[in-house]
Amino acid sequence: MTERAAAPIEVEFSEPRGPIRWRRWLGLSLPLAIGLVFLLAGVLADDLAPHDPSFIDLSARLAPPVFDGGTWDHPLGTDDVGRDILSRLMHGARISLIVVAIVVPGSAAFGTLVGMASGWLGGSTEQILMRIVDVQLALPAILFAVLLGSIFGPSLRNVIIILLIWTWSGYARLVRSEVLSLRERDFTTASRALGAGGWWIMRKHLLPNVVNTIVIIMTLEVAIVIQVEAALSFLGVGVPAGTASWGRMITEGREVMIVAWWPIWLPGLALLTISLTGNLMGDWLRDRLDPRLRHLH
Amino acid sequence: MQFWNYVAVRLLQTIVVVFVVATIVFFVARLVGNPESFLLPYEATDDEIETVRERFGLNDSLIVQYGHFLGDLVQLDFGTSYRGAGTSTIAAIGDRAVNTLKLTAAGLVFAVCLSIPLGIAAALRRGRFTDWLARLLAVFGQATPSFWLGLMVIFFFAVELGWFPTGGAEGFKSLILPAVSLGLLEMAAIMRLTRSGMIDVLGADFIVTARAKGLRERTVITRHALRHALLPVVTVLGLGMGRLIAGAVIIEVVFAWPGVGRLIIDSIVQSDYPMVQTAIIVLAASIALANAAVDVSYRLIDPRIRVGGLG
């Protein structure tokens, strides 16, 4: 027995005029297509990339992209030491994908568990867990990241650990508040009266009811995770120097910003595009699954 | 006086949070190796090293060091910096904190002043050009990485056009670019929330009644609809304060802004733990206080909570 939203909520989609159908179709298929391109580029970077992403060729430094007077040898040009930007973007996509693939499901699982436990058990468990969430909200994670990065040296592992620590509390708070209202509902009480254990109720009654919320946050979290990874790499505490990551590429592009636009614009645009895609997909899901969550993001 | 009870409890919680943050920072900062190597010339003798370790209490066990740290903290003594001939860390941070405060406040002002009018305008002209433009701005504002945006605006408005300085904190002009880069994300978030809140509330019965009473449209919007629509905005603003303070760290690095964030990053490079420790505690305390202030003001604003809370 599963129940969805508390009351049927009237959702009015917001295009009162214009060709509604193709817009709505585009609203989903365009982000999906871009997401797919990103996924393929990252997964198949070794096979698809035209060059070795860290191959330095000083004779070809700062070659412009093909649409700005360059050649097809380097379709998106080269950076200040002659590395192929397209290949670096693809390998950078892989770094972002790895981070997303570990952090998003990981923090969702942990945050959901904490949220359910504190909502269901209540009492001192709830108090302690929620104070931990408070601490986390007050500790500027970016500073913590810089601190950890300076101690253990920049590495992908640090980035992943920091992002895991940073993102789980969002799930925990939302899931907790949903569980708080669910536990008083008739179907939970009935189930308890029939002798169901806490674990059973959580699995069979609570989880199906919060799964929408979790999926929506996970989608919106993709863009955040990718951006934070880039920001940490930009500050020099993310992935090690030399690794092809979008944040690193922006740092390196900054040095030659005045003479060449592409080394800083292209990774920035990649970051912007993928964030847009994640947010649009999250919005789309939210409008359809749970419009009450509009305040997220 | 249930309200004041609530304020007291919330303040107490804030103190506990700051205490825990301080503890975490203390132990994490102690994980790094030898600060004496930064304090002394390369060729220092063992004796000299020993004197320095003794002076900063680095020879005591971790627990004893922690005890001293807590004792000083309670007396609001945050210790002295390893660098600059024993300057008090809190004094050094004081100057920087003013700059960070300026930057954060400017970012917040930019976000609020632009987002709320824009959100209202978009809601009132739903589906028309204004709405379309506002939503486009929101979507891009939320997806643009702030550090990249910062570099781009430096390039266009400072290097190419020369309208603003490229960095530093010299007067009002130097504040504009960093504040806009910092505030854009919050701007987009508050704008979206205002818009959707207004759209919801404009269909409500009490708005229809207000119009039916013959009130001017302006009064209906500002006195009736807006008050209602802004409630969720206050909550988001609270979390936004934390995001702004944390985001200021990156923006300070991009714009060479002499704030606490940059101080922390510089101090980490120099292994100046007391400085890092104090700066992070100060930032965390200000975020925790901001969160508490928002919770308290939420009780004051929302009549439903107020009735329940004050009895």
Image (spheres, coloured by chain):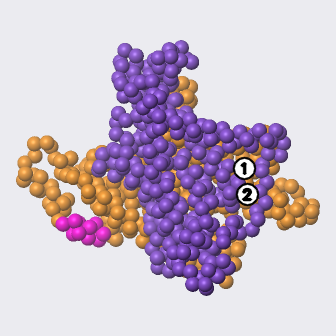
Chain colours: A purple, B orange
- Few, some or many residues within 10 Å of mark 1 (<14, 14–19, 20+): many
Quarter in which the N terminus of chain B is drawn: bottom right
User: Residue A106, position in %: x, y?
Assistant: 46, 56
Residue highlighted by disc 2: B197
Q: Nearer the viewer, residue A221 or B309?
A: A221
Which label number is shown at residue B119? 1
| Secondary structure under the numbered disc 1 in the rendered image | helix
Asked whether the beta carbons under mark 2 and mark 1 sit within 8 Å of each other, the answer is: yes
Q: Amino acid at mark 1?
A: Gly
- Look at 51% across and 59% down and name the residue there: A108
The verdict on residue A37 being magenta is: no
Q: Nearer the viewer, residue A107 or B207?
A: A107
Q: Nearer the viewer, residue A264 or B163?
A: A264
Q: In the image, which residues are magenta?
A: B61-71
The verdict on residue B67 being magenta is: yes
N-terminal of the two: label 2 or label 1? 1
Q: Amino acid at mark 2?
A: Gly
